[in-house]
Amino acid sequence: MFFFTSAKRVSGLQISWQGPLKSTFALPSQPYRSSSAALTTAQRALAARTSGDQTLTRHSNNINSKLLLTGYNCISQRCTSTSFHSSPKIAARSRKWFYKQQTFLNTKDCSSVEQVVQLTMENIKKLAPGNYCAIWVRISELLQKEHRVVHDTTFVENQKLEQELKRILYKTIRSADMFSPKHLSGIILALAKIVRHGRRVGRIDSGMRDNESSTLLHPLYRILLGDNSINQDDNMLLPLFEAANNRLQKFEPRYLSNLSYACALLRANPTYDSGITLFDNIASEAIKQIDKYNGQDVSNMVWAFATLSIQHSELFKAVGDTVVHTNLKRFQPQDFSNIVWSFATLHEDHPLMFQSVGDEIAALDLRGFKPQELSNTVWSFATVNADHPAMFQKVGDTIVGNYVDLKKFTPQNISNIVWAFATAHEQHLHLFKKVGVTIAEHDDLKAFSPQALSNIVSAFSSAGVVHLKMFDKIGNTIAEYEDLKSFKPQEISSVVRAFETVNVDHPGMLQRINAHGT
């Protein structure tokens, strides 16, 4: 039996404990009822570590993280209650004491995922809550920079790395209740970006199974994407989502926005009691503090709802009203683009908001807009029938005047732009001419989807613009298809009708279409 007396002042808080120090400590079956009990137990573990006794030190090492977590949860979640005598000020000081017992890692100096993993594993038993977020953010950044598969590691090294990554991931998931809203949203967002990049690199979806191609992927992609690990019905990240859902009231706008954006990347919207989903709760909290949202917060939030096809008219009305009464000069091009795209995608009309956004865009220098942002903007206005000639004129002038060619525009961008101008009945002959030249000189129109080809010729015919070389190039492309199974019947009929409208004859294309019909 050992006896230990401790009198420690922590940030102005006097903590004393005197009594027998046994070789074993029993963790309570329920959370501590007071901060003093939590601190006392943690102090006993710390005393064992500093006493020099190997048995006690080994035991305290094993339970230290659990003791600290239990005490931290008590202090952070319970000590502000009126049922306890501890004040919020004391709770804050106590929380600082717990943090001092943890190790804070500097992952910014790590230049590879392997280095991050090694540093983490060396300190795995005493990680501070904020470290988990920093670890996954750094891993996400490094994976996006590397753009490589794992040819340069041996099978044994690769297996070791995979096991260590699993341990770090599972420890992160088990510690979900320990994280602050900032760290929780940051961890989920970092993991979501890893998943998104893994899908791009491996050309895989969440239903991927292990196969020869998957063995070339980074181990972390196999962990998160293999064997349906993040499928909606059995998502390994559900504990993180649940921890966030339980504390949404404490999420600031930025963290709530990041959480919704991350869930959209992961294609996740867990359902809880009474059929209420995570996004239902996110919307309720967002509406309460919508006036505090900046452009990026609003943009990411509505983008997430639109990406997952989640209707929530009350939230979108609140967002629209806020945008109308906000200084839009602080908004970035992507903010404008994402907001109007989200409204249009979910068919949420808000005339005043579209008018305000259109006015602002028409007054801006649009050289800062990317092709995708220009395309999405005009497509959105046309989709909801939002009339704004000045905005359309400005976008058309920008495309014509600032791009020597349209190589930076994807086939979908080009298709959406001309479709939007034609649908909105906005004339811009120079824009259509530039698009016509670009398509006529394109090396291979097989890069254009059947829908894109159909939309382009339909847009030109609707606008009354005839570009013979472009129509001829598209006709030749369709005629060269071995079969037209990739074309929907409506797309084929739209192409034929467009050629007839502008009186352009293309026997080869019609022959292929007729053969397809038989």
Image (cartoon, rainbow, N blue to C red):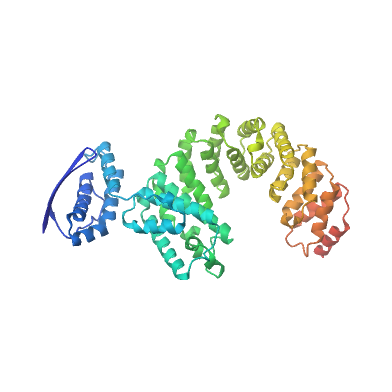
Question: Residue placed at 66% from the left, 35% from the top?
Answer: 366
Q: Is residue 314 visible?
A: no
| The one of 187 and 406 positioned closer to us in this rendering | 406
Instruction: Give residue 367's position: percent from left, percent from top.
Output: 66, 37
Total labels: the figure holds 0
Residue 461 place in picture, x, y as percent = 81, 45
- Provide residue 365's location: percent of width, then percent of height: 65, 33
Is residue 279 found left or right of 387 in the rendered image? Answer: left
Of the 4 image quadrants, the one containing the C terminus is bottom right
| Of 273 and 321, the residue lying toward us | 321
Quadrant for the N terminus, please. Answer: bottom left
What percent of the width, then of the height, locates residue 444? 76, 56
* Residue at image point 42% right, 41% down: 251
Residue 506, quarter of picture: bottom right
For this rendering, which residue is in front, 132 or 258?
A: 132
Residue 178 visible in this rendered orientation of the protein: yes
